[in-house]
Image (tube, grey):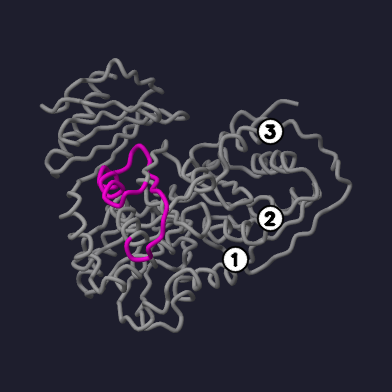
């Protein structure tokens, strides 16, 4: 039989446009390949988000796997991806499958594979699954059908988080918090965690809207203008934004000030080490902020640097003693939980930090920046006519008057200057898109670096 060449697992699962490459047939092909990879007699949890037909797609996956002799626990409602990961780990299942396209536009859907530990499946699993596509015999070799049990996965997830977060520390605080669910599966589950406390929660965009109001459900500054305005006008103590499947976070400080996810990682590292007094290293990606390097050095903890993609952080969390790991897009994983991202838990830990330090989040951040330096971070992407192959030797040795003193090229190419500013290029391996990142100690320089990077690509074709 011929393989299916239209299905490729990327940085975080397989995604496609509904009705184009994300079809019933292709989803069944992927499910058959996963079933063949697992073999009969295994147990799998299946979850889904609030996207168009996600519940139907989850049913299809469950039917295919159960027909191959695999027992299925199917969520009875849309859930955050970390809920699915927690279920797999806590119930000692063999695998998890989440139907979601995360922060992609509404026309997309996708499928994420979670390992038995709850972490993101790495290339060794996804490549194996890809190799089996379209090559599975139609006959059920198991000659048995596995059960499909629909269950409420939220109950166990919320129960654990209530034990993980220091509710005694925050229960008497009267923080006012505005949560923007961005119409995703984060919904209002955080209220179940904080039940019985004096925290005053309000929600926005927590009803199902598969169109996401015409915007991608990604917690980046341009998509959070309403959240920022409300936090400022209504004097909230904290704003929390979750992406489409609630595994990423962004935050807003009093006054409507956007807190970049890079800075959230820094705050979580300081909180878990200094307030919780936990041990462990810190993980950032190659596109992460220099501020976290300074914090790791100050805390005397080991800093790990990975390629972009939380699966690399997940892998480290399973092998090393990791305090916290985070990616530049807002995915944060913490010690003593699952080796995976959880936007809700990250937001709760920010509240906890405020309670421990008896200060608002903006004052905490300002104190950290005063000690470790204030860094401005921007990213953009360019759509090109064709895939490009960047070469280290073609890169400039100076960026806007500052000498390049280090080059990293284990995922894209990152040029680091003598003043700690840097510029990074990361082409997509599957489509003609290049992502450009920049950081500097002044907003003016970081903007100029980003424009300079775009010019290098568009005018010189580096």
The circle on residue 94 is none
| Horizontal and vertical percent position of residue 206 | 43, 68
**Observer-nearest of 100 and 394:** 394
Point out the tag, 1 or 3, that comes first from the N-terminus: 1
Q: Quadrant of the C terminus?
A: top left
**Observer-nearest of 83 and 92:** 92
Q: Which residue is mark 2?
A: 93
Q: Is residue 289 magenta?
A: yes
At 48% from the left and 39% from the top, the residue drawn is 11
What residue span does the magenta drawing correspond to?
274-301
3D distance between C-alphas at marks 3 and 2: 23 Å
Q: Residues within 10 Å of mark 3 (few under 14, many from 20)?
A: many
Q: Secondary structure at mark 2?
A: loop
Q: How many marks overall?
A: 3
Q: Which residue is mark 1?
A: 77
At 40% from the left and 54% from the top, the residue drawn is 217
Q: Is residue 259 magenta?
A: no
Left or right? Give the position of 294 relative to 25.
Answer: left
Left or right? Give the position of 458 relative to 90.
Answer: left
As drawn, the residue found furthest toward the front would be 300
3D distance between C-alphas at marks 1 and 3: 29 Å
Point out the tag, 3 or 2, that comes first from the N-terminus: 2
- Above or below for 391 versus 276: above
**Observer-nearest of 53 and 380:** 380
| Horizontal and vertical percent position of residue 350 | 34, 65
The circle on residue 133 is 3
- Above or below for 451 versus 232: above
């Amino acid at each position: 039989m011929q393989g299916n060449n239209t299905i490729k697992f990327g940085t975080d699962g397989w995604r496609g446009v509904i009705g184009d490459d994300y079809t019933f047939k292709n989803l069944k092909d992927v499910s058959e390949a996963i079933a063949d990879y697992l073999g009969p007699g295994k147990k799998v949890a299946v979850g889904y988000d609030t996207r168009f037909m996600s519940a139907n797609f989850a049913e299809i996956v469950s039917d295919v796997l159960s027909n191959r002799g695999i027992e299925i626990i199917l969520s009875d409602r849309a859930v955050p991806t970390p809920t699915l990961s927690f279920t797999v780990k806590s119930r000692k299942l063999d695998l998890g499958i989440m139907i979601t396209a995360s922060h992609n536009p509404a026309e997309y859907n996708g499928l994420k594979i979670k390992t038995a530990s709850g972490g993101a499946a790495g290339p060794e699993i996804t490549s194996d699954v890809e190799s089996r596509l379209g090559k599975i015999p139609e006959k059920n070799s198991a000659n048995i059908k596995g059960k499909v049990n629909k269950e409420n996965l939220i109950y166990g997830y919320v129960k654990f988080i209530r034990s993980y977060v220091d509710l005694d520390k925050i229960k008497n605080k009267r923080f006012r918090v505005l949560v923007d669910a961005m119409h995703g599966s984060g919904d209002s589950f955080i209220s179940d965690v904080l039940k019985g406390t004096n925290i005053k929660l309000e929600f926005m965009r927590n009803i199902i809207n598969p169109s996401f109001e015409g915007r991608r459900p990604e917690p980046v500054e341009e998509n959070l203008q309403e959240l920022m305005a409300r936090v400022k006008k209504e004097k909230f103590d904290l704003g929390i934004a979750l992406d489409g499947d609630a595994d990423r976070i962004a935050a807003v400080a009093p006054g409507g000030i956007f807190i970049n996810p890079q800075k959230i990682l820094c705050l979580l590292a300081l909180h878990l080490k200094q307030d919780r007094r936990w041990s462990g290293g810190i993980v950032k990606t190659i596109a992460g902020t220099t501020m976290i390097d300074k914090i790791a050095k100050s805390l005397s903890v080991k800093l790990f640097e990975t390629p972009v993609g939380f699966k690399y952080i997940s892998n480290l969390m399973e092998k090393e003693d990791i305090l916290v790991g985070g990616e530049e897009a807002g995915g944060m994983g913490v010690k003593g939980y699952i080796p995976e991202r959880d936007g809700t838990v990250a937001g709760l830990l920010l509240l906890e930090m405020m309670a421990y330090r008896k200060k608002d989040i903006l004052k905490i951040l300002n104190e950290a920046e005063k000690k470790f330096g204030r860094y401005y971070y921007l990213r953009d992407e360019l759509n090109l006519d064709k895939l490009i192959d960047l070469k280290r030797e073609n890169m400039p040795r100076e960026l806007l008057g500052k000498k390049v003193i280090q080059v990293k090229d284990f995922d894209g190419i990152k040029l680091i200057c003598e003043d700690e500013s840097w510029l990074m290029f990361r082409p997509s391996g599957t489509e003609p898109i290049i992502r450009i990142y920049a950081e500097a100690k002044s907003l003016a320089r970081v903007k100029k670096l980003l424009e300079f990077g775009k010019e290098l690509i568009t005018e010189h074709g580096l």
